[in-house]
Structures are given as structure tokens and as C-alpha cells.
Image: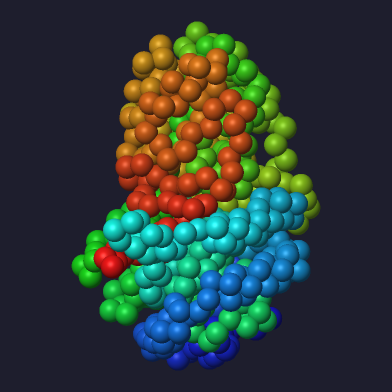
Amino acid sequence: MDYTKLYINGEWVQSNSKEFIEVENPANREIIGKVPRANKADVDYAVKSAKEAFETWQYTDLSTRISLMEALIDELYKRADDIAYMIVKELGRGVDFALDMHTIPYIQDGENYIRIAKEYEFEKDMGDYILRKEPIGVVAALTPWNYPLGQVTKKIIPAMLTGNTVILKPSQQTPLVTYILADAIDKVGFPKGVFNLVTGTGAEVGSLLIEHEDVDVVTFTGSTKTGKEVAQRAMKALKRITLELGGKSPSVILKGADIELAVKKTLDTVYNNTGQTCSALTRLLVPEDEKGKIEEVVVNMTKEYPFGDPALSPTNIGPVISEKQFLKVKSYIEKGIEEGARLIYGEVPKDYDKGYYIKPVVFSDVDNNMVIAREEIFGPVLCIIPYKDKEEAIRIANDTEYGLSAAVFGPDDEAREVANKIKAGNVIVNKGIFTRKAPFGGFKQSGIGREGGVFGIEEFLEVKAIFK
Ligand code: NAD
């Protein structure tokens, strides 16, 4: 596949810029490809194409859009192995994990969006008026590197299904998977301009898209810091925005909980993907008098997680994405020690050599005011925070600027009561299993809006009342 082009107006084109961004394999630091560092002329061309395409795409029959999307899903299934192997290389995940957690669930998520679109009432007679839900227009989708396919398909599939047109600006760190996606879209034969892929940096291409007068919707997933900036600039023109941002999510173990279950479900979110998951339950709140017992379970289970070279599957924990991320996680581990948290497993990573590998680290006796308990580390680092009683557990759980995810383990009624009181967009209770059919998004500084299921569809619809 040729990664040196952009996909605009239904064809692969040369960028107007002569510059490229290299993509590195974080497991061995080899350069695995380079993509255009697109410029203003490229962005203008992509937006013009998307705007022209919207003129007709918005009025196509829903059945036509659904048929094209079903064909895209078929193409993605055919390319699932290629996608997974690309995620092995550009994100540094083991192939099983890349296929089972990064690829297949998001293709299934696309199928779910299609099912919802088939049943959704885009127009409804309300008696004295007609309620219509209409596509909004040109969508700029800005996505992060930690789920290179999933964070993209969550946006572009509902956006295009509902009659919007899209310009995708993927993360410059993991753009190669989106070339496989664009190739599939090209094969299916969507009308030209409905989907456009423009690679480049956030500061250049991202900024140009956010402020372009013909972009109507900005859907952004990334850090809270960048999200705030994106929102401020997009709001100058009152563009519609969706922000899916960071987290520092609590997992609360109540007295009487199934500790093995609680620890396993918590650690899966913290270690898989080497801790680079927005919804990771990185603050484990434990009853003070059960701390020792729980620490022991945490340490024993931590040892079980496969760590190593992603080329040698299974390896749920391997490298983090980049040198920058390696240094950031390392400095947080040093900070935790400096702040007086008790390191009960792991160590400060040595300098990287072959790749940016970081092994799990567990801190206990963490005070919720410590930096390691307040800031998103985005690495395999767990903070155990003791609490005295249930009220204090709820207060600590909510004492964060974030509100993305949470989990509560304990007797069912009590766990539900605590779940109801936690300010987060999604909460797992005991054996509850996360499904992408449900809304996903954050309270507080974890974002604005929701992705997933019917809520994800509605982010791309404008509401109109027609009085007859
Ligand atoms: P990031 O904020 O650095 O970048 C996200 C995207 O925005 C990238 O495409 C980047 O190029 C672009 N960008 C950067 N600066 C920009 C600017 N000034 N203007 C416009 N675009 C700009 O985030 P990241 O490091 O790629 O991703 C990690 C973050 O994403 C974490 O904080 C994680 O919690 C968050 N995340 C959230 C969710 C969610 O659903 N809530 C999901 C995945 C990741």
C-alpha cells in the first residue's frame, strides 16, 4: 500500500506539501512508513470535496447509505488480519490482542450502528409538528493513537451513515491503519468526497480543520488539554462539538466484594494496551483494614500478565507508544516515589533500548491529592488508595477533575448505590460487562457528548421541528 498519498475526493492524490511524517514501531524503533505532512492547500481541497459531496449525500436514501456501509463492514472483515498486523507494528500490541480488542469489536460496533440506523426514526409525526433529525454537514474527525482503528470508526461510521461527509485527521503516530480503512472505503465505492483522509500534525492540519469556515462539526478524541483548546477554537464559530477526553477512573472495592474478580477486572483495564486506555481504572480504592489482603492479590495477579515483544504474542503489556510517552510515564513513577507513595511492585524503568518497554508498577498508600492520583499517566501504573468508610470512598472516587469511567465491587445493592453516586459516564458493577452499544463519554473534564449506540448516531444529527 502507498502511504505517501492522501485520499481526497474519491482518489489517492499527492499532497501539496513535499514533507512527510515518519511512523515508528515502538517495539523496536524501526521506521515502518511515512505519511504526508499535509498543508493548507490539502485541507482546503478536502473540505471543498466534502462540502460538495454533502450537497447530494445528505439526500441519498438511507437504504443506499446502509448498503454501502454494509459493504464496508464486509471489506473490513476481509482486512481484519491486515489491520491487526498493522496495529502490532504501529502501536506495539500482540497480534491476538490487536485482533480481539482493537479490530473485531470495532467492526462489530459498525454493524451495531447500521442496525440502529435501520430502526431509527429520522422523521416522526408529533401531532402538531413533524420532528426531523437531519445530517449536519462536513465533519472533521480528529483521533488519538491509542486505539488506531476503533477511535476512528466510532466517528466516521455514524457520521457517514446519517448523511454527513467526513475529513479524517488520524494521529500522526498511528496513521497507517487508516490507509487500510480508506482503501476499503475506496473499494466499496462511496460517492467521491464523502470520506477524505488527510494526514499531518494536530498543530497544522488539526488546527486548520477546526477553524475552517466550511467545517460544521468537530468530533475530537484525545487529551483533555488539547480538547479544551480545540473546543475554544471551534466554538468561535459555534460549530457542533463532541469531545472524548482523558480520565483518572476509580475502581471501588467495598467490604464483602469478590476481591479476585474486582482486582482482575481492574488490572485488565490498567495493564492491557500497556495502560494506554482512556477508561483505565487506575485508582483502586480499598477498605483500609483489607488493604494488605488486596495488595497481595494485586501483586500476585500482576505477575501473571504477559509482558514482552508484541511480535511474540501473547503480550498484553509491551512498549508504550513513543519516547515522549516513555519519559512521561517514567517521570510519573519517579514522582510517585518522591511523593511518598509506597512502591509495592515494579521499579523505575531503565532507559529504553530496543523499544519503549514499561513493566507494570503498583503504588500503595497513595493519597488522592498526590500527582500520581490526579493526573492521567497513560502507562501500566496502578495507585491503591485506602479509605475508611463508604462515604469516604465515594468522596475520593469523585474527587477528580475527570469523570469518564468507574467500577464498584461489593454486595449488589450497596454497589449499585455507590455506582449511582459516582460522577462518571459509565460504571461497571461486579460482573457487569462493558458493551459498545451503550453510550460512552465523560462527565466533567472527560468530555462533552457521547459515542456508541444511538447516542453516537445523534451526535451527528441536527434537530428540526416543522409545523404543518
Ligand atoms: P492528543 O490530544 O495529543 O491528540 C489527539 C488528536 O488531536 C491527534 O490527532 C492530534 O494530532 C490532534 N491534535 C493535537 N493538537 C491539536 C491541536 N492543537 N489542534 C487540533 N488537533 C490537535 O491525544 P493523544 O495523545 O493522541 O491521545 C491520548 C489521549 O486521548 C489520552 O488523554 C486519552 O485519555 C484520550 N482518549 C480519550 C478517549 C475517550 O473516548 N474519552 C479515547 C481514547 C483516548
- Residue 327 placement, left or right of 368: right
- Name the residue rendered at 35%, 56% in the picture: 126
Quarter of the image with the C terminus in it: bottom left
Q: In the depicted view, which residue is nearer to us: 240 or 375?
A: 240
Q: Is residue 216 above or below residue 370?
A: below
Q: Is residue 382 above or below residue 313?
A: above
Residue that protrudes farthest toward the left in the picture: 236
Q: In the depicted view, which residue is nearer to us: 400 or 359?
A: 400
- Name the residue rendered at 54%, 90% in the picture: 13
Q: Is residue 262 above or below residue 152?
A: above
Q: In the depicted view, which residue is nearer to us: 461 or 220?
A: 461
Q: Position of residue 280 (x, y in %)?
A: 52, 40
Q: Position of residue 388 (x, y in %)?
A: 40, 11
Quarter of the image with the N terminus in it: bottom right
Coloring applied to the structure = rainbow
Q: Is residue 181 visible?
A: no
- Name the residue rendered at 35%, 29% in the picture: 398
Q: Is residue 228 above or below residue 7?
A: above
- Name the residue rendered at 40%, 70% in the picture: 135
Q: Position of residue 247 (x, y in %)?
A: 42, 43
Q: Is residue 177 visible?
A: yes
Q: In the depicted view, which residue is nearer to us: 56 or 314?
A: 56
Q: How many marks?
A: 0
Q: Position of residue 173 (x, y in %)?
A: 53, 65
Residue that protrudes farthest toward the top in the picture: 289
